[in-house]
Amino acid sequence: MRWPLLEPVRTRLADEQGALRKQAATRIALCYPSPYHVGMSSLGFQTIYREIHAHDDAAAERAFLPDDLQAWREARVPLCTYESQQPVAGFSCLAFSVSYELEIAGLFDMLDLAGIPILREERDERHPLIVCGGPLTFSNPVPLAPFADVIVLGEAEELIHTLCDALTLPRHELRTQLSRRPGFYVPELSGSWPGVVKAEDDRLPARSQILTPHTELRSMFLIEPERGCSRGCTYCVMRRTTNGGMRTVDPERVLDLVPEGARRVGLVGAAVTDHPRVVELVRKLVDDGREVGISSLRADRLCARPELVALLAQSGARTLTTAADGASERLRKALDRRTTADQLLHVAGLARQGGFQRLKLYLMVGLPGEEDRDLEELAELAAEISRLVPLSFGCAPFVAKRNTPMDGAPFVPIDEVERRVAYLRARLRGRAEVRPTSPRWAWVEYMLAQGAEDAGLAALEAWRAGGTFAAWKRAFRDRGVRPSRGRRVQDGRLRLPSLAAWPTI
Ligand code: SF4
């Protein structure tokens, strides 16, 4: 197709290395409901792309939420794939990888641009099968149910092959067969959604297929030396109970898979620094002259393995990032997050020694039972750290997720979250930068994270009404959407002993 709006697509394609092309009877449009620069940084998306191409007689082409959505709408250009620039509506299946709750709006945008009815009940067999999977399915895929024909739950390296086989069947048979298989949720037929599935270990490690300069991680080859986590932080979807704890890949295998020409390598995983041989792996990569990034640095591991900080500095990193998560020791203990102030101070010292320009700490605000004395403790710690190294906080409102022990914990009112962020900003002025994410959109995320199908339908109404925060608020109210009270209320067993009372919504 020669629509001028596809010019940037052609430019990006020309700059890519590793895109796959194949003639096949089953053609899947692999869709990412955020723009290209986000989607191409997703290791899961790239892995499923490779797996589909490895399947007999199946091929994948990629589609992303256009950067300039309004221009696409006005020009009435249908959503097209990158590889062949054909409209996605002509494919047998659209498979969406949904990372988190707010991407549901991107799903609506893409279906709408494709000219495909958004609601499942308004589609029939002439339309492509709409499949959703991705990280969101580890916690709560139910708001996607009114829109998806099939939802793939959890790690999809094997499930995608089952799906490719099923795509050759008549639609009713496909639905019936998949509804009986582990890892597939067919909203029309399945009573409730089954559990998350994990892939066989020999499918690991996930790794980049395509390198592109048009992402934030510019031409970085991503690879997953471990999957999952052996720890049990009570707010985290990736905790040990979700997909069988941590599974590691030998450094030798990781190194074999890194292409000779990859100058930048990103080690991705929930708990990369818990890998027992991570130092050895990073040392080898750095000795080969590569720039190395690690997605998850645990403070206790950096203290135990200071060489890791030195190696990261040597490979060219300028910011050292780790997580505090709770503002005080009391909160961190209650969350089973066990990072101590001493460890964070120690890491700051290592950052200084390594010549890092900045230490960045992730922090959640609005945790159950959080008080100003917790924020005060953080401010005192920040003052000490900032004497060692410039400091910034990535500050996110706490959002309780399903499939965690904190499921059902309420969202602290938006104005209270804003007050706490303002308090921190005031206390940290001149010592640390505070970069908060929006409490309003965190609340929308919370309503979807804790919601059921009615939350998904409210999302559609909000999207149709323009997608402003006011539209979301109105849609949740009009539909009477109430967040789940989760296991805490249902079985009465879950307790956070040191946090006496959770604030009300
Ligand atoms: S927050 Fe990190 S350390 Fe804790 S369970 Fe999740 S992945 Fe593991």
Image (cartoon, rainbow, N blue to C red):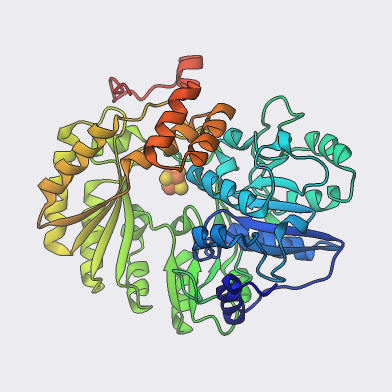
Say which residue appears at 47% left-offset and 35% top-offset: 401
Q: Quadrant of the C terminus?
A: top left
Q: Is residue 473 above or below residue 60?
A: above
Q: Is residue 448 above or below residue 36?
A: above
Q: Position of residue 491 (x, y in %)?
A: 50, 15
Q: Nearest the camera: 288 or 81?
A: 81
Q: Nearest the camera: 405 or 92?
A: 92
Can I make out residue 234 in this image? no
Q: Nearest the camera: 9 or 350?
A: 9
Say which residue appears at 51% left-offset and 32% top-offset: 402
Q: Quadrant of the N terminus?
A: bottom right
Quadrant housing residue 319: bottom left
Q: Position of residue 108 (x, y in %)?
A: 58, 46
Quadrant housing residue 232: top left
Number of numbered tags placed on the structure image: 0
Q: Is residue 167 above or below residue 305?
A: above
Can I make out residue 32 in this image? yes
Left or right: 100 in relation to 180: left
Q: Is residue 451 above or below residue 178?
A: above
Say which residue appears at 23% left-offset and 74% top-offset: 355
Q: Position of residue 291 (x, y in %)?
A: 43, 77
